[in-house]
Structure formats: C-alpha cells, structure tokens
Image: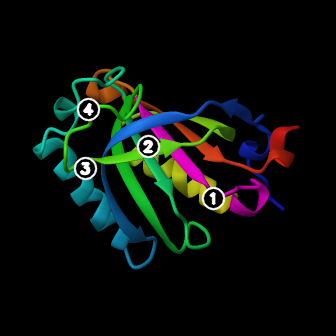
Amino acid sequence: MEISYLVFMKSIDRSKAYLAGIQVRTINRNGQSMIDLGELWKSFYEQQIQQQVPQRLNDEIWVVYYDYASNFQDHYTAFIGCPVGDFQGIPDGLHRLEVPEGRYLPRAVQGHMPQALMAEWEVIWKDDQHLNRAYGHDVEIHTTVPAEDLACWIYLSVHPANSK
C-alpha cells in the first residue's frame, strides 16, 4: 500500500480571514471545474478585480473552495479574491467571503502554473482518504513572484484529530 508524504505533514491553526472577489459554483466531473475555473480566472483578470479592491491588505490572490456538497468529486463553490481587513467599502458586485479560523494542512507548491498546482491537487485527491479533510474552506494563497517561479500555498481544512 502506497501512502503519500502528505499524511505525515502537521496541521496548523489559521486565523479568520476576510476576502473580496468573485465566485462560481462548479463540480469536479467531466472537466466542468476546469472550464468554470478557467472562466473565473479570466474574469478575475479581465475585470481587474484586484484593482477594484483598494483596501486589500496585500497583492496575494486567494482561491477558496468551500460549500462542498460532499467531497472533491461533487459540487462546490470556487472563490477568487483578495484579503481585506474587513468588509467596509467593498465595491458593489463583489462577493464577500469569511474564511473561518480552524485547523489546516499546509502544502507548498512551486513551479509553472497551473500545471504544478494541478499536479499537487492530483496528489491530494489520491490521498484524500488519509488526510482527514473537513471539506470546510480549502485555501490557495498565490504569491506575487516572477511567472516561471510562481509559488502557492494550499491549506486543506482538516478535522482537529489531524493535529498530531
């Protein structure tokens, strides 16, 4: 039996975060999520969502997967946005999302995006039964570095029992 190294990573506590951005409801079947997420990213850049949020805390881009119907194979909501201190002054037309505090399993991703990111999600899905996932708010935090060396952190929401 093959077990990935992800099983042995230590979960951490993350504090609550507030985000402003756009979102879509999708499903991981028949390539639908790839289509929907591609369109969401396209809208994020074409509509210059990041620039619409002057009160953003930094230039990170957060992607949050939440409101899961059951697990990664079913319906969920995907959100792309920017961290803000609170929801005051968020422009009309943008969604507000509160990512709750909780236990998260971190995973660093570096390489050419989106290929490196998709490869990491494939590893996560393969090990899903071993990860004690809570399917609450799974977060990607994309940093701003040169295109060939893009970096991203994935934080999987997990049940407290995964803290050992």
**Residue at point 46% right, 71% down?**
28
**Residue at point 37% right, 67% down?**
25
Mark 1 or 2, closer to the camera: 1
Q: Circle 4 is placed at which residue position?
A: 89
Residue 131 belongs to magenta span: yes
Report the magenta residues as a range.
128-142
Q: Which mark is residue 95?
A: none
| N-term-proximal mark, 1 vs 3 | 3
Q: Secondary structure at mark 1?
A: loop
Q: Circle 3 is placed at which residue position?
A: 41
**Marks 2/3: CA–CA distance:** 16 Å
**Marks 3/4: CA–CA distance:** 23 Å
Task: Tell me the kind of residue under disc 3.
Answer: Trp
Q: Residues within 10 Å of mark 3 (few under 14, many from 20)?
A: some
Task: Tell me the kind of residue under disc 4.
Answer: Gly
**Marks 2/4: CA–CA distance:** 35 Å
**Marks 1/2: CA–CA distance:** 22 Å
Mark 2 or 3, closer to the camera: 3
Q: Furthest-front residue in view?
A: 88
Task: Tell me the kind of residue under disc 1.
Answer: Tyr
